[in-house]
Image (cartoon, rainbow, N blue to C red):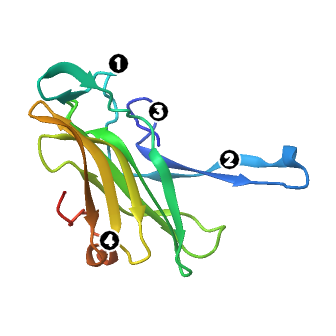
Amino acid sequence: MSDDAFNSGADQLWIYELAANWSTPASSTFSRTQQLAVAAFDSDFGNDWTNIAQLSSTQQLDAIPQVIMNVPQYRNFGTYQTIVCCHTVDVDATDHAGVRWYELRRGTQASGNWAIRQQGTYAPDAHSRWMGSIMLNGSGKIGLGYSVSSSSLNPGIRYTGQSSSAYSSGTGVMDIPEQ
């Protein structure tokens, strides 16, 4: 990902591809093949590791911004391919963390271009959510797990998701209630 707060240009996801040459490994290439424009985001939490408040403590937690969290998940459904991924964003410039997530899609041709099918930021209230992990199952349901904390909540782990009907519509909304 590229945040315009740190790099010139716009907020983007960068796609890299590896072309392995098994006969001559030194001839293998790893290159950026696409730059996808995404909805504006802010991953700048400052120059320290004290970003997320927690209940009954002045010690704050690291938001771990500016990186894609977990491993982006790739799936091939036969008629299309998907990648889901997520990262932490500051939703209101007050170190209030939320999870920005994306679904990328392309047709069956490996040489085709990826496109953003849907994207969203999960931050439904004043608690911070960060360190997300996102997956898409074979039934068209997305699960998003993450850490949660605030000055009124001890750190914990929660999850939400997108139902198969919301996924089919590409709403960009996690419509399964948080647990």
State the separation of the CA atoms marked 3 and 2: 19 Å
State the separation of the CA atoms marked 1 and 4: 36 Å
In the rendered structure, are the residues bearing label 1 and label 4 in contact, judged by CB atoms less than 8 Å apart?
no
**Residue that mark 2 sits on:** 31
| Between 132 and 8, the one nearer to me in the picture | 132
| Between 149 and 43, the one nearer to me in the picture | 149
Place of residue 65 in the rendered image (x, y in percent of width and height, measured from the top left): 38, 34
Q: Amino acid at mark 2?
A: Ser
Place of residue 125 in the rendered image (x, y in percent of width and height, measured from the top left): 12, 46
Secondary structure at badge 2 equals: strand
Against 75, is 153 above or below?
above
The numbered mark at residue 170 is 4
Q: Amino acid at mark 3?
A: Ser
**Residue that mark 3 sits on:** 8
State the separation of the CA atoms marked 1 and 2: 31 Å
Identify the residue shown where x is 68% and y is 47%: 31
Q: Nearer the viewer, mark 3 or mark 2?
A: 2
